[in-house]
Image (spheres, grey):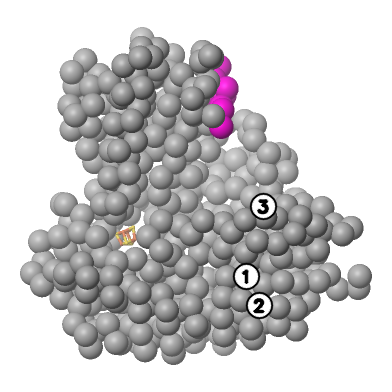
Amino acid sequence: MIQKKMAYIITYGCQMNKYDSDVISRILKTNGYNLTDDEECASFILINTCSIRKHAEDKVLSKLGELVCRKKNDKDLRIVVCGCMAQRLGNKLVHRFPEIDFVLGTSMIAELPNILNENEESSLSTTFIKGKKVYTEESSCIYPVTSIHEKGLKSFVAVILGCDNYCSYCIVPYVRGKPRSREKIEIIREIELLVKAGRKEITLLGQNILAYGRDINESFDGLLRDIHSIDGLMRIRFLTSHPRDITKDLIELFPELPKICEHFHLPVQSGSDHVLRLMGRGYTVEHYKQIIKEIRKKYPCPSITTDLIAGFPGETENDFNDTIELIKEIGFDTAFCFKYSPREGTPACKFQDQLPEEEKNRRLKELLDVQKAISLQINQAMVGTIQEVLLDEKNPKKAAPLAEAVSLTWAAPSVDESSLLGRTRGDKVVIVPAKNHRVGDIGIVRVVEANNWSLRGVFVNE
Ligand code: SF4
């Protein structure tokens, strides 16, 4: 039987969407909803959407089709769509699926309590399509700071929303708007609440995180220093850094602030200057290599990860080979590889020389194969090393699913129940015996075995 005010959230896409869903779930809880893991029990279903690739949007459309069928027999069901696709296609979605109750754009999360409570005093700017409300204007507050209900060791925290780099392939600036930093005081307050609720590790998020503070007279370095001084917080990570914006000063800050993990995620996207120019990335391959050199000069074994796009329009065989050469030369710990997906409204979508699907698939496969061998080599070289490991969870006993679009995420192979999963400071999965240890501990581990996805370790002095 369906219970009233049971909410179910479906999240597609990136870490920012995952964070948005966390904030939405906190708002729902403080406004009288219970969250359920069982979609069938829910009377309020919210789909948090992604527009980064066509495949992600197709999945949402198919899910909406399914929910609309269910609503025919269940008139009380409320369907809400938010996220990038809601921002991009809000009106069109309501035209196509009039059963949607309301659409919430990417800048409107803070207004959700007013919307849920139909607050008459609210001055929300709303478009009505077929009698349904579409909220896609910009709200003055990016994210509210709410009480933390959920348990966990790690959380994402958004510090800046939006991007104005306009890389030629990317839909983000159109759906997330210009960069808007959150007030430092709010970020600190949220992290303090998270730490009080048990978090040991925080990953700061921003589509272009190194732009933090430019619009509010703050600096990213200053934000890191203040977060670092929060008692009880043990690890800090941040995503995503644009290679053009990373500075020597930031690289040198890491030893001074030891809670920051030596994990650099620097999306290079291509190893060819010709393609980087077409992408509008604003740096050259040489500049990128120089940054890596600086990082490696400062740290003996940093973890360096990247994003790569295979089959960008106009990418020649030589350009592609340059990318293969670059990933071999740098030796990335892992790479999130995607084939180019044209996004309507972006310049690259109209570029001549779009590559056929089978060619994009071939190049993607080659990238993945080469990267897989590199990851194996790097992990094997870690056998015998000592690592600090935060024990995250009990081993789920089955391999974690690979992220959408065949990225090289870390996936744990099946092992026995007496083991735990943890992460090194470089964000590598380590499987360790559970004996004498609990989730939440930080242990010192010797790596004894490695495959291309994960490491196996034993506790030192045990
Ligand atoms: S910097 Fe990142 S988010 Fe911004 S336009 Fe480029 S790819 Fe998109």
Q: How many marks?
A: 3
Question: Could you say where residue 158 lies in the image, as x and y percent from the top left?
Answer: 49, 47
Q: Left or right? Give the position of 439 relative to 82.
A: right
Question: Could you say where residue 401 lies in the image, as x and y percent from the top left?
Answer: 51, 56
Q: Ligand 1 is in which quadrant of the figure?
A: bottom left
Q: CA distance from mark 1 to mark 3?
A: 14 Å
Hey, what amino acid is under mark 3?
Pro
Taking the view exactly as shown, the residue that stands out farthest to the top is: 120
Residue found at x 17% / y 56%:
346
**Along the viewing direction, whichever of 175 and 389 lies nearer the viewer:** 389
Picture layout, residue 321 above or below residue 232: below
Q: Is residue 14 visible?
A: yes
Question: Could you say where residue 137 lies in the image, as x and y percent from the top left?
Answer: 27, 32
Respond yes or no on whether mark 2 lies under 8 Å from ligand 1.
Answer: no
**Along the viewing direction, whichever of 15 and 248 lies nearer the viewer:** 15
Residue where numbered disc 1 is placed? 454
* Residue at disc 1, secondary structure: loop
Hey, what amino acid is under mark 2?
Ala
Sooner in the amino-acid sequence: mark 1 or mark 3: 3
Residue where numbered disc 2 is placed? 450
Circle 1 or circle 3, nearest the eye? 3
Residue where numbered disc 3 is placed? 396
Q: Is residue 243 visible?
A: no
Hey, what amino acid is under mark 1?
Ser
Query: Quadrant of residue 329 in the image?
Result: bottom left
Q: Which residues are magenta?
A: 28-37
Query: Quadrant of residue 291 in the image?
Result: bottom left
Picture layout, residue 422 above or below residue 27: below
Taking the view exactly as shown, the residue that stands out farthest to the right is: 462
Residue found at x 10% / y 72%:
353
Residue found at x 49% / y 28%:
39
